[in-house]
Amino acid sequence: MNINSVNEEYGIYGMLFSLSNRIQTIGDKEFEDITMKQHFMMIALGMFKQPPTLKEMGDLIGCSYQNVKRMAEHLQKNHYLNIVQDSADKRKLLLISTGKLEKIADIQKEKTIEFMSKLYKNISQEDLKTTLNTLIKMDKNMGGIIE
């Protein structure tokens, strides 16, 4: 395939989907009981200072409330997190990590380093910063909340 035959905007658009699918395929093979999307949600859980609500998690990861709830229920079933009622507002459900993912991450630390090394091989720090800034701007354009 000749990616240079399309303009940059379409090339980036296509590459985002293609790369996302490749990462998901590789990652789904790494865990027996969770998907890469669920893994991403667990990583995002660590970005909050306080346990997030389902809505807050959905806003951060770009998923609907229903999708977040379904993933959270699966993660709870597999002991990655607990879904608890907010004591201040009984209508809200909070997500709290059990620490299971962190334990697995410690065990698989070398694999993670190897994967990240392969993913970012031959990419300069300057290119990484530019790429991250571009993706943040694209996310904002689509209504994202990352700052």
Image (cartoon, rainbow, N blue to C red):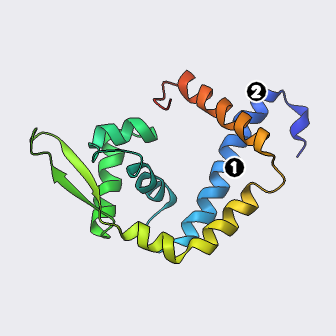
Quarter holding residue 56: top left
Quarter holding residue 30: bottom right
User: Which residue is disc 2 drawn over?
Assistant: 9
Say which residue appears at 61% left-offset and 26% top-offset: 137
Q: Amino acid at mark 2?
A: Glu
Q: Tag 2: Cα neighbours inside 10 Å, few (<14), some, or many (≥20)?
A: few
With respect to residue 26, does 60 lie above or below? above
Image side of residue 105 versus residue 130, left or right: left
Q: Earlier in the sequence, mark 2 or mark 1?
A: 2
Nearer to me, 22 or 128: 128
Check residue 19 in the rendering and tell me which mark sits there, or answer none: 1
Helix, strand or loop at label 1? It is helix
Nearer to me, 32 or 120: 120
Q: Tag 1: Cα neighbours inside 10 Å, few (<14), some, or many (≥20)?
A: few
For the residues labelled 2 and 1, say whether their Cβ atoms are less than 8 Å apart: no
Nearer to me, 82 or 14: 82
Give x and y (percent) for residue 29. 57, 71
Say which residue appears at 27% left-offset and 56% top-offset: 96
Image side of residue 18 versus residue 94, left or right: right
Say which residue appears at 35% left-offset and 42% top-offset: 57
Q: CA distance from mark 2 to mark 1?
A: 15 Å
With respect to residue 147, does 113 lie above or below? below
Q: Amino acid at mark 1?
A: Leu
Say which residue appears at 68% left-offset and 30% top-offset: 134
Give x and y (percent) for residue 69. 29, 49
Give x and y (percent) for residue 87. 9, 45
Residue 33 shows in this picture: no
Helix, strand or loop at label 2? It is helix
